[in-house]
Image (spheres, helix red, strand yellow):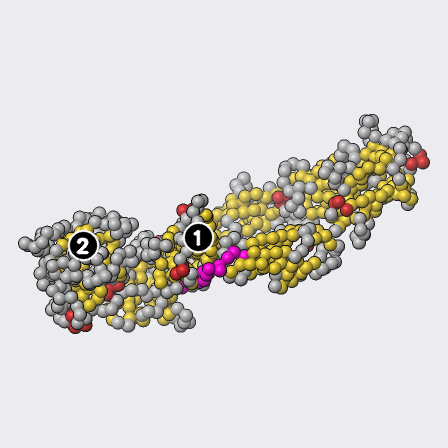
């Protein structure tokens, strides 16, 4: 993995490594069985966190680690639909000991130095989901400028819930104030109206939610239209015919809207010839009509529609409509010379339609040639004077624009329309806009600049420059591209080249950076066992990389290696000389030594050519458990407390113990177990199973080695697996001896799937014996020792000096014991295993 950050190379396809704080939520399921007087109470603790790479979760109860099978009242699993994203701890039939502190630990295994994160939840017999109550009306109707307080109180929940407010607008108004569950909105406006919700969360169950609606009273957008007699095919108003005046207003809340009509400033009441109606609000909300039947000369005048809200507090909206002999339908024309209209990209343009008639209606502008939005993003734009003004016009805005009359503030008749053509001129669009070209000295270089589109499409000329120096200029023929060639690149030929392709509007520019810089090296992260330790306080690291496009520029003569400890500023540098030409894909190796354990280091690598330094790349080298880089021999005699990083199986019945005869308890069971280690020393240590009470027959203890890895001769595949000799010493003395099994668990296998590669049962006498098995590993594996308790307490089994050596076993015994109790011995078949050593090595 290439770690992100200022010092690492971050690619768009590799999101930055991260690990967010985990969150634990608790969910309860309570069901009551019929005809039985008990109920079951099950609790689910869900742990979730976002990360890259994926998280490995673990659970603790208090200080105890919880694992699947460690407690019959506990299940740990991942839901199928969210595998890798969450981990659920299920507590079945809550017991008193289940009321405790639970820790969820999220880990990305220290990738890029990211530390584990932990969250703790305390489960008690009072744990309960949150509940709340709103002390407000629903809805809340207010006038603009008033202050609104929304009060939310917690009525239950353990732990104490936290209260937050949300808005249907997505975010709360900036002026809002929140304190102790109360949200205050000072000087509300129409923009503050909407749904507000109070949310109480304590991570138990689902959050409690309650909401209310704020309605801000308002009147806006008053409009009118005149409808001539619908029973005659005539758009004009005529004496003796019907005419209808419609008035529309947007009101909040709509049920408070009320209308009144005036004629020449005097109140007008509904009559047989002057019919006032308010239409169905579901069909035309906020609309009132005045029907004048049998229009007379005395009906000419100014009619006023007045809209208001019941209860007042909001200014009225008045709309005046003049009905006279001069009231005529509209007409639209485009002024001479205003279509087609040619402008340059980036300028401001005004499209104009002349509108006549009385009253003059609102003009609607839209695209006539295609279904695309207008410059403001809407499908239609309104204009009260017939002018559409476009600022910073772009080439995409070229085309036909339709202007048409609307019914608003005019006649409700068939729309009048006209079309304006807009032509946007722009300089040539070219490619490449910018390109880096890398080339070595003495080689030819070709640069090409192409025209994609331009208006006017007739291109006038081109100019090639290096910096400010003109190299070549000319006029285009029928081609839409121009080339510039350097036959033999000299050092002064490096630099920035430009090609300007010019029409009457301006130039389009191709830019080329010609450089001899080498590309960045690419670190190889799959090096087999890169870390080794040959002294207690320092370690070494095998650094490997390949060179990106090594033949693109001059030969790489050396690499500048920089190294510094993480958290420090000072770099140490040295040059690594390179002999000959580097081939594409060639793996280059350099050993870093004298690294102080357990410090991590930032490593920077820069290629050097005749041109100078190329692009650098960095990575982080971290110290982990010591690794033998050559895997000639692995030996563990259990003399040190880490026991070579062997671990106890968490799913067995009891554990193996590290022991020596010098520290043995005086009350040990006689007639079983060794009196010293394999070399006969009473101070030497070994591993053994103690079969005294409370152990019972059939109990098992399993000891797991670290994960091992072998390095194939061909790092990309294993066609002929190498052989290794797996050997150990065992001591099986006592009349109640059970069985000793040795397993090799391959990657992806469970312990139950791995069959024993060596097995022996029964009393073998009071001495250490040697077992050897040849294995042929090809993928990662673990060695597992399994001791099984026999029928009594005189059944202690011990192992010592576990070894893995390169090559086949020189004298593998076909049967380790003759004339002993019944036992089985089997040699291993070729297995798919890899020996990746993260253990301490010891010479004997």
Query: Which of the two discs, 2 and 1, labels the residue nearer the N terminus?
Result: 1
In this image, 788 relative to 93: left or right? left
Quadrant assignment, res 48: bottom left
Task: Tell me if residue 114 is in the magenta stretch.
Answer: yes
Give the labeled residue for mark 2.
741
Task: Give the secondary structure at mark 2.
Answer: strand
**Quadrant occupied by the N terminus:** bottom left
Does residue 681 sit above or below 324 in this rendering?
Answer: below
Mark 1: which secondary structure?
Answer: strand
Answer yes or no: is residue 360 visible.
yes
Residue 41's tag is 1
Residue 215: x percent and y percent?
Answer: 70, 51
Magenta region includes residue 111: no
Q: Are the two marked residues, 2 and 1, in contact with CB atoms closer than 8 angstroms?
A: no
Residue extending furthest top?
Answer: 232
Which of 674/424 is in front?
A: 674
User: Marks 2 and 1, how far apart in space?
Assistant: 42 Å
Q: Which residue corresponds to the image point at 63% horizontal and 38% vertical from the top-left?
A: 371
Query: Looking at the image, which is closer to me, 355 or 328?
Result: 328
Residue 71: x and y in percent read 34, 56
Q: Can residue 554 be seen here?
A: no
């Amino acid at each position: 993995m290439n770690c992100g950050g200022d010092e690492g190379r971050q690619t768009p396809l590799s999101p930055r490594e991260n690990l967010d704080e985990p969150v634990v939520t608790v969910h309860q399921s309570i069901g009551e069985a019929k005809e039985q007087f008990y109920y079951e109470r099950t609790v689910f603790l869900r742990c979730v966190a976002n990360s890259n790479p994926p998280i490995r979760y673990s659970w603790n109860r208090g200080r105890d680690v919880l694992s699947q099978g460690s407690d019959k009242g506990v299940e740990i699993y991942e839901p199928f639909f969210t595998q890798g994203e969450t981990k659920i701890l299920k507590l079945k039939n809550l017991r008193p000991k289940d009321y405790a502190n639970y820790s969820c630990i999220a880990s990305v295994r220290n990738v890029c130095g990211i530390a584990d994160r932990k969250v703790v939840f305390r489960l008690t017999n009072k744990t309960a989901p949150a509940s709340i109550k709103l002390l407000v009306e629903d809805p809340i109707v207010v006038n603009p400028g008033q202050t609104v307080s929304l009060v939310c109180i917690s009525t239950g929940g353990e732990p104490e819930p936290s209260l937050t407010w949300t808005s249907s607008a997505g975010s709360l108004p900036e002026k809002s104030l929140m304190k102790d569950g109360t949200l205050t909105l000072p000087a509300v406006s129409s923009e503050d109206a909407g749904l507000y919700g109070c949310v109480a969360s304590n991570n138990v169950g689902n959050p409690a939610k309650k909401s209310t609606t704020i309605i801000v009273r308002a009147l806006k957008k008053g409009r009118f239209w005149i409808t001539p007699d619908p029973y005659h095919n005539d758009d004009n108003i005529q004496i003796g015919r019907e005419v209808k005046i419609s008035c529309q207003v947007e009101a909040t809340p709509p049920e408070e809207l009320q209308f009144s009509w005036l004629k020449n400033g005097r109140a007008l009441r509904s009559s047989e010839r002057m019919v006032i109606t308010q239409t169905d609000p579901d069909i035309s909300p906020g609309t009132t009509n005045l029907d004048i039947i049998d229009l007379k000369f005395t009906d000419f005048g100014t009619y006023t529609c007045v809209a208001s809200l019941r209860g007042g507090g909001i200014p009225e909206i008045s709309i005046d409509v003049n009905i006279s002999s001069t009231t005529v339908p509209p007409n639209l024309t485009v002024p001479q010379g205003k279509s087609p209209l040619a402008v340059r990209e980036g300028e401001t343009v005004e499209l104009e339609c002349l509108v006549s008639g009385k009253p003059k209606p609102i003009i609607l502008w839209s695209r006539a040639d295609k279904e695309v939005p207008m410059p403001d993003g809407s499908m239609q734009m309104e204009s009260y004077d017939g002018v559409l003004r476009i600022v910073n016009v772009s080439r995409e805005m070229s085309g036909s624009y339709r202007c048409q009359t609307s019914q608003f503030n005019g006649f409700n008749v068939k729309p009048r329309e006209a079309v304006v053509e807009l032509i946007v001129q722009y300089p040539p669009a070219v490619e490449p806009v910018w390109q880096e070209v890398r080339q070595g000295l003495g080689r030819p270089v070709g640069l090409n600049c192409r025209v994609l589109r331009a208006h006017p499409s007739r291109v006038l000329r081109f100019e090639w420059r290096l910096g400010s120096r003109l190299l070549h200029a000319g006029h285009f023929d029928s081609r839409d591209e121009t080339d510039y060639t350097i036959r033999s690149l000299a050092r002064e030929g490096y630099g920035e080249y430009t090609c300007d392709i010019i029409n009457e509007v301006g130039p389009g520019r191709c830019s080329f950076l010609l450089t001899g810089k080498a590309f960045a090296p690419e670190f190889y992260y799959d090096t087999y066992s890169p870390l080794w330790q040959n002294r207690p306080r320092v370690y070494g690291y095998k650094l490997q990389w390949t060179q990106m496009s090594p033949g693109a520029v001059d030969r790489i003569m050396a690499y500048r290696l920089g190294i510094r400890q993480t958290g420090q500023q000072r770099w140490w540098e040295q040059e690594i000389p390179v002999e000959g030409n580097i081939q594409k894909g060639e793996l280059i190796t350099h050993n870093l030594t004298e690294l102080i354990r357990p410090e991590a280091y930032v490593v920077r690598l820069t290629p050097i050519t005749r041109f100078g330094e190329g692009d650098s790349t960095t990575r982080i080298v971290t110290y982990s458990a010591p690794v033998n880089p050559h895997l000639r021999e692995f030996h563990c005699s259990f003399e040190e407390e880490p026991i070579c990083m062997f671990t106890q199986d968490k799913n067995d019945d009891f554990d193996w113990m590290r022991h020596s005869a010098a520290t043995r308890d005086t009350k040990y069971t006689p007639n079983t177990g060794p009196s010293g280690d394999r070399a006969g020393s009473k101070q030497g240590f070994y591993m053994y199973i103690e079969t005294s009470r409370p152990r019972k027959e059939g109990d098992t203890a399993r000891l797991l080695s670290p994960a091992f890895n072998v390095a194939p001769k061909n790092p990309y595949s294993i066609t002929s697996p190498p052989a290794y000799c797996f050997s150990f010493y065992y001591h099986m003395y006592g009349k109640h001896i059970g069985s000793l099994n040795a397993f090799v668990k391959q990657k992806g296998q469970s312990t139950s799937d791995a069959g024993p590669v060596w097995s022996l049962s029964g009393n073998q006498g009071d001495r250490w014996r040697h077992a050897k098995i040849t294995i042929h590993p090809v993928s990662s594996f673990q060695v597992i020792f399994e001791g099984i308790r026999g029928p009594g307490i005189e059944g202690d089994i011990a192992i010592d000096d576990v070894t893995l050596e390169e090559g086949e076993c020189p004298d593998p015994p076909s049967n380790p014991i003759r004339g002993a109790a019944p036992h089985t011995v089997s040699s291993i078949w070729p297995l798919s295993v890899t020996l990746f050593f993260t253990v301490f090595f010891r010479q004997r």
